[in-house]
Structures are given as C-alpha cells and as structure tokens.
Image (tube, rainbow, N blue to C red):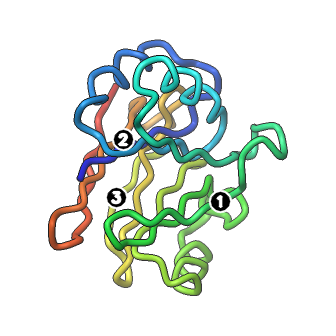
Amino acid sequence: MKLLLISDTHGKTNGLENIIDKYKDEVSAVFHMGDNSSDVESILGAICPNVPAYLVAGNCDKPGRYPDEKIVEINGKNILVLHGHFVSVKSSLNLLTSYAQGMGVDAVFFGHTHKPYSCIHEGIFFFNPGSYSIPQIDTNASYGIVEIDSNGVFSGEIIKK
C-alpha cells in the first residue's frame, strides 16, 4: 500500500496538481500534515475524489477547520497524523515519541519543521515529508511516499520537488 504525504504548502501550490495527478492511481490515501491543508483538499476533489484524504491543522491554519491530530487505521496499523507544533518537534522528537508511545501507535506522520525526516525510533515509524513550498536552507522542497508492505512494515521515500 502506497501513501502520498505532503505538508507545509503555505498556499504555494505550484506543481501540486501534477504531483497528485501523477500518483492518483498508485496511492491508497493522501495526507497533509498542516499549514494550508486546504491546498490539497481542493485539488483532490477535482483530480481523484475517491482517494481518501487525511488532513490536520497546522499552526498557520484557521482554528476549527481541521482537527489538530487524528489517528488513522490502515491495514491494521494505527498512524498518528499531526502537524507537530504542540509537541515541540522543532527542538527534538522526545515529546512526540513519548506522546506516540502513550497512544500506542505504529507510525507518526508530522510536519512543522520544514525538514524531511524518516526513521524508526523505539519501534515507531516517524515520517516528515518536509515542506512542499518553503524548505529549510539546507534542504529542498519535498513531499513523501510511504509504503506499508504486506507484513505491515513501513518504509518512506523523500522526493525532492
């Protein structure tokens, strides 16, 4: 199973339609981890309305439009989806790790740092696709593809825009 992950678009959607169109027949779901989740929502409705979208709010989103976080179950695996600003991901992943462990999830998809990140830590798969539009100085604009194999093992690929 293949998942498309996008975060931190900040209203800058140049080329986003092409990326969603490219993967529309390959992915089982699309995730946006905040800071203009509406950027993805409008495009998905036009290009692939049958692909589920899981959208959460970031610190730059209007309060109340999207949840701050959600747990999504895919193929028996629980995935925590959040932006990350409430758990201080810019300083370290310690609080996020403790939070994820307390929730008993298998994976965490997050954003906020504008830096791509993919690793397994303390048995949990962590993935941040980076920023689609405003990368950190030492990174490129990016998005991600996460796969869950038939054994329930996660793997992630950061794709530079």
Q: Residue at x 38, y 63 (%)?
A: 74
Task: Give the residue pinned by disc 2.
Answer: 4
Front in this rendered view, residue 26 or 19: 26
Q: From the viewer's perspective, tell me whether residue 16 is left or right of residue 57.
A: left
Ranked by sequence position, the earlier of labels 3 and 1 is: 1
Residue 69 is tagged as: 1
Q: Residue at x 42, y 16 (%)?
A: 17
The disc labelled 2 sits on which kind of residue?
Leu
Query: Label 2: how many residues lie within 10 Å, few (<14), some (14-19) or many (20+)?
Result: many
Front in this rendered view, residue 23 or 102: 23
Ranked by sequence position, the earlier of labels 2 and 1 is: 2
The disc labelled 1 sits on which kind of residue?
Glu
**Residue 75, quarter of the rendered image:** bottom left
Q: CA distance from mark 3 to mark 2?
A: 14 Å
Circle nearer the viewer, 3 or 1? 1
Q: From the viewer's perspective, tell me whether residue 47 is left or right of residue 104.
A: left
Q: Is residue 107 above or below residue 40?
A: below
Under circle 3, the secondary element is: strand
Q: From the viewer's perspective, tell me whether residue 138 is left or right of residue 154.
A: right
Residue 126 is tagged as: none
Q: Is residue 44 above or below residue 66?
A: above
Ranked by sequence position, the earlier of labels 3 and 2 is: 2
Task: Give the residue pinned by disc 3.
Answer: 118
